[in-house]
Amino acid sequence: MKHTISILVENHAGVLSRISGLFSRRGFNIDSLAVGVTDDPSVSRVTLVADGDDYMVEQLEKQLNKLVDVIKVRTIPQEELISRELLLAKINAPAEKRSEIMTIAEITGAKVVDITTSTITLEISDRTEKLANFEALIKPYGIKEMVRTGTIALQRGADAIKK
Amino acid sequence: MKAAQAMVKCLEQEGIKVVFGYPGAAICPFYDALSESGIRHILVRHEQNAGHAANGYARITNRPAVCIATSGPGATNLITAIATAYMDSVPMVVITGQVSSDQIGRDVFQEADITGAAEPFVKHSYLVKDASAIPRIFKEAFYLAGTGRKGPVLIDVPVDIQNVDIDFNYPKSIEMRAYKPSSKGNNLQVKRAAEAVALAKKPVICAGGGVFSADACNEVLELATKADIPVVTTMMGISCIPGSHPLNMGMIGMHGVKSANLAVNKCDLIVLIGARVGDRAVRSPSFLEENAKIIHIDIDPAEIGKNVKVDIPIVGDAKLILNQILEIIPKLEHREWINELLALKNAPAFEKRADGVVNPKLFVSKLAERMPDDTICVADVGQNQIWTCNFFCMRGGRFLTSGGMGTMGYSIPCAVGAKLASPETPVVAICGDGSFQMQMMELATICQHDIPLKIVIMANNRLGMVHELQKNLYKGNTTAVFLDGSPDFIKLAGAYGIECERVSSEDEIDGAIERLVSAKGPYLVECRVSPDEKTL
C-alpha cells in the first residue's frame, strides 16, 4: 500500500542525504521524494511516497523522527490527501497531429509551454493516477523527453502540521 | 581567540579531563591549543583505538568522552570505533580535522568525506563551515551525545576554520526545536505495567545495556527484590546486578545459559528494560509474543515494536520509569517460579584438561573469584567473550564488551579508557590470540601512560569461534582460521617491559592469577587453550 508522508526538516545542508541514507540503510522502498522550502525559510518540507505495510510506515516514521534535523513527521491519511505532481513532456508533433494533441491537452487540463515545427511541450499538474492516464494518451505520438517532480501533498481541512 | 583554542575551551566547559587521539596536519591547530590546556591527551597507536578508549571512558563515567583524529585516513580509521559506539549507544564526541574549507571536494591530500562516510553510524554530525558556530556546535554535540538514546556525535573541522579568530561565549542553553528526548514514562502505561506485573505468575525482568545508560541498576534490583522477579540480562546488561545475586539467572541468547533462556521461554510476562531484543539475544521473538505479555521500557521509541510486538510500551528514561513503577507496585512473591529456575542454575563443573592447556572457563571463574568486587572486566569478541560472559561472575563492578557490533580488538583500548575513567578500580581485559593481534600495538600506549591494566590472552592458535562454526556448519572445512606466525606473546610483552607469564597447566592457574592481581603495573597472562575447546 502507498503511504504519503510529510516531513518538516531544518533547512540545513546535508539533511536530504541523511534522510535518503536512512531509506537505503533500513531497506525502505521509496516511490518519490520532493523537497522545497516552506513559508518559513528555516524549514523545508519533504513529501515522500513509500510502498509498504503498516510496520514499515511505523518504522519509517520512528526512524525519521530520530534524525536530529527532522522537526515533524506525519503520514497523511489516504482519504484526506490533497496531492499534486508536476509533469513536463516534449512530444513529437508534426503539423497534422497538432490539433489532436491540443485536444488531449484541453481535456486533461495540460498547458502548452513551448511549441516548435516538430514538437509541443506540455505541462500538467495533477494527482499521480491522472498523470499516468495523461502519459498513456500522449505516448502514441512519441515522447521525446519527460520529467516529473514527485508528489507534494497537504492534508484536507483546517488542521496544519505544526513546527 | 583562535577557533582551535575555542574548541579546547569547549571541552574544558564540558568538564573533559582526558582525551584520546592521534594527530595529523589537519588537526594541528587544535593540538597546539590542547597542549596549553590542563586536558590530558592519551596518544594511542591507531585511531580506531582512540575511539574504543573513549568508548570505555564514556561507559564508566556515563558521560560523553572525546576522541580525536586528523583528516583522511585518520578519520576513516575511526569509523569502526564510531560504529561500535553507535551500536552500543555509547556517548562520544568525535573530533576530526578536515582539509582546508576552500579545498573540500577537490580530492586533495588526506581528504575524506568523513561526515558522509560515518553518517550511518552517528547520532548526528557537523561539518563546521563557520568558525563562530563552534561553541554552539560543541554544546549541541555534547548534549546530543549524552541525552536520550546516547551515541556518537562527529564534529569535522577544516584546518583553516581552526585558525580563524572568534569571540568565545559558551552557550548556557540549547535551542534545538527538533530534538526532544523523552524522560518520564506515561503514567497510564506505567499503571498498566504495574498491574500486569502484579497479575503475572511467572514474570521475568530482562535487563539490557540501556540500564547502564539510564543509571538504573539499583532500580532494577529494587524492582526485582520488591516484586520477587528473576532477572536475566542480555550481554550488554551483564553486571547490572551482581552475577552472584540469587535472583540473577544469567545471560540469555544464543550463547546464554539454560536458566536464563528457560526463564524467557517459560515466563508469562517479560519486562524488557533498555534491551532491544537483538537477534543474538532472542532468536524467535514470535515465540515470546505468543507466550508472554511483553512490557518494553526504552528511551528510543523506534526500538519499541522493531523486533518484537509489545503489549505495554513505555518510552522514557528507565530510571524514572522504574521509580514510577516502584511507587505503585505492591510487594509480591514468586518463590515457586524462582525455585524452578534456580534448580537449573547449577554450580559450574569444570572438566579437567590435559597438561599443556587449561580450561579457559575454569581460569576466568578463578580470576573472577580473586579479583576485587568492584573490578571492571572487559571481554573482547569470540570464544573468549562467551567464556567471560558466562564464567566471570561479576560481584559488583562493571562488565564491558562490544555487544552490538562485535568488534574484535576492542578490549585493551576500552580497558585503557575505563582505567583512566576510574584509576582506583582494577581493570582486566580478556581477549583471544586473534583479537589480541588486532590491538597489541596498544601495549605501547599502556607503557607510555603508565596504565596498570591486567591482560589475559586465551591462546589456542585459532580464530576459535569461526573455527568451531566451520567445523559444525561447513562440513569441517576449517579455513583461514589458523594463526600460525603469531609471535611469542611472552617475549612480545617482555619487549615492552610488561610483566607476563604463560599458563599451560591447571596447577599453574592460582599462582598466575595471584601475581596478575597483585602486580602494581600492567601484567599479561597467556593462557594456553585447546584448539577444540567449545564456546559453550
Image (cartoon, coloured by chain):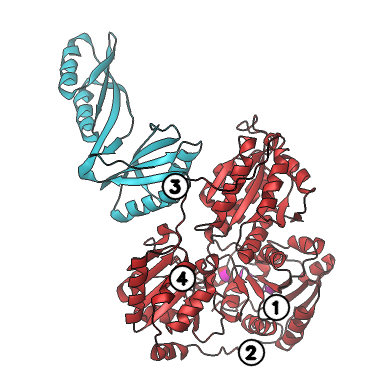
Chain colours: A cyan, B red
Query: Is residue B163 left or right of B203 when viewed as pictured?
Result: right
- Relative placement, left or right, of B336 versus B22 is left
Residues in magenta? B457-465
- x, y percent for residue B107: 63, 33
CA gap, disc 4 and disc 3: 25 Å
Q: Is residue B509 above or below residue B273?
A: below
Image location (x, y in percent) of residue B246? 51, 87
Q: Which residue is label 1 attached to?
A: B528
**Residue of label 3:** A22
Q: Nearer the viewer, residue B61 or B22?
A: B61
Q: Where, by quadrant of the figure, is residue B162 drawn?
A: top right
- What number is the disc on residue B224? none
Whether the residues at callouts 2 and 3 have beta carbons within 8 Å, the answer is: no
Report the chain holding disc 1.
B
Q: Are marks 2 and 1 in contact (CB under 8 Å)?
A: no
In the picture, measured across the screen, residue B282 lies left or right of residue B44, that is left
Q: Is residue A145 above or below residue A40?
A: above
Mark closer to the observer (1, 4): 4
**Protein chain holding label 4:** B
